[in-house]
Image: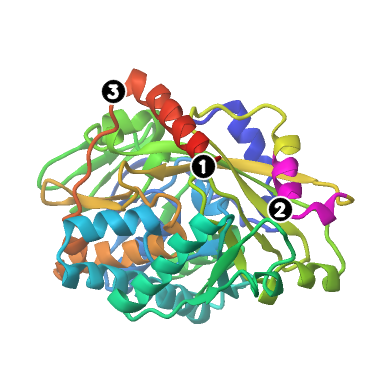
Amino acid sequence: MVSPQEIELTRSSYYEATVVRPLSRAPLSGRIAADVCVVGGGYAGLSAALELAERGYTVALLEAQQVGWGASGRNGGQALVGFGFAGQEAIEVQLHAMDARRAWDISVEALQLLHARIDQHAIECDYVPGQLSLAVNARKARALKAWVEHVARAYDYPLHFISPDEVGNWIASERFHAGAFDPQSGHLHPLKFCLGLAAAARTANVRIFENSAAIRIERGANPVVITTAGEVSCRFVVLAGNVYLGEFGKRVAPELMPRIMPVGTYIIATAPMDKARADALIRQRAAAFDTNLVLDYFRVTADHRLLFGGGESYSTATPRNLAGRMRQRMLAVFPQLADLPVPYVWGGFVDITMNQAPDFGRLGSNIYYLQGFSGHGLALAVMAGKLVAETIAGQAERFDLLSRIKHHAFPGGALLRTPALVLGMLYYRLRELF
């Protein structure tokens, strides 16, 4: 999974350039014991570890690279309510209306938990409230308005619909026909937040081991998680590596790998602007994304840059001339930024499920997994960590609610599922042109 191109893209990240990482934690060596072994040093794993430690459990966390190296340190930084349009639809199809409401309320609590973590642990991560969903034509505007009305009716969640007459007051772009504003969602510096969670976990006595990929689990009443240089004997395991379980995922949890697909997404950051110019781009400096299937997402950073993402790759190959292609996408939205250089370009993989709803569950009675966040994982992954900690502590009702969502393997098997998805996405991309 980890290619030289991806390593290079990680190094060129704006996020990495704007943090000071603590000294790397030593890799696991020898055999240790813990109540819980968490695999994965992103939001879900760190949140689970922190919550469990605060409940009195001893916790060891294994990270294959560095904390925040995967999607938690490279994403678009948008903290959103809900499960995305497709994910929410899948939940509503599978669950009773009352349970779908409970699932939605979990996502609302996810935003509240995000704020609580930031406040409690004094995490400096440039949080800004507000999020815009933007429709590029009249047909998509009608669908967006129907969504606004639906979440108000079904979930008592207020969104402000932005009509064609007023959309120009919200965003300095002629590309968009209408929009919707969510004051409760927002955006932040994702790597700063992730490193802040890791610092809080260490303060709570979580033992974090970096450069310690889990390569195998001996399952049983007392599982043993094995790395190349050590092993953790424990009572419970939490798998929170998602697509970054990588090549070892086929040995660690082979039954899970076919249910998620790595999808590449890429981001650029411009040179800084003066504050007034940056303020003029997006009202209230809200996070924004369009409602296309292959979407663009963007926001203004604390140091007055435009951060612009999109350009998904469904083949796991990094696109050629990535910086140039991403800059062209940005200029299609904001042509007035043509004078700005683009010093940063980076990307990585998110884990999507067939129905784009999250995939939580158990392997046996004492191994839990959290995956399939499908591009909505910033706040939800933090909440997922809390839910799995509740479950280990004996309060499984909310975790079990989400684990009832059924998932299917991607068609085509290991060799054909990626080409099949590429063809499918090309079909839907062509449909969006008409």
Q: Residue 330's spot in the image, x, y percent?
A: 72, 49
> Could you tell me which secondary element the residue under label 1 belongs to?
loop
For disc 2, the marked residue is 333
Number of labelled discs?
Answer: 3
At a point 18% along the width and 48% down the height, the residue shown is 406
Left or right of residue 298, residue 423 in this image: left
The amino acid at mark 3 is: Gly
> Could you tell me which secondary element the residue under label 3 belongs to?
helix
Q: Characterize the magenta stretch by its predominant secondary structure.
A: helix
Q: Which residues are magenta?
A: 326-338
Q: Residue 141's spot in the image, x, y percent?
A: 51, 62
Give the foreground label among 3 and 1. Answer: 1
Crowd tier of the residue under label 2, counting other residues whose Cα lies within 10 Å: few below 14, some 14–19, many 20 or above:
some
At a point 71% along the width and 36% down the height, the residue shown is 325
At a point 39% along the width and 34% down the height, the residue shown is 229
Q: Quadrant of residue 297?
A: bottom right
The amino acid at mark 2 is: Val
- The circle drawn on residue 413 is 3
Give the foreground label among 2 and 3. Answer: 2
For disc 1, the marked residue is 432
Distance from Cα at disc 2 to Cα at disc 1: 17 Å
The amino acid at mark 1 is: Glu
16 and 298: which is toward the camera: 298
- The numbered mark, 3 or 1, whose residue comes first in the sequence reads 3
Q: Residue 333's spot in the image, x, y percent?
A: 71, 53
Distance from Cα at disc 3 to Cα at disc 1: 28 Å
Is residue 368 placed above or below 55 in the rendered structure? above
Left or right of residue 173, residue 60 in this image: left
- The numbered mark, 2 or 1, whose residue comes first in the sequence reads 2
Q: Are marks 2 and 1 in contact (CB under 8 Å)?
A: no
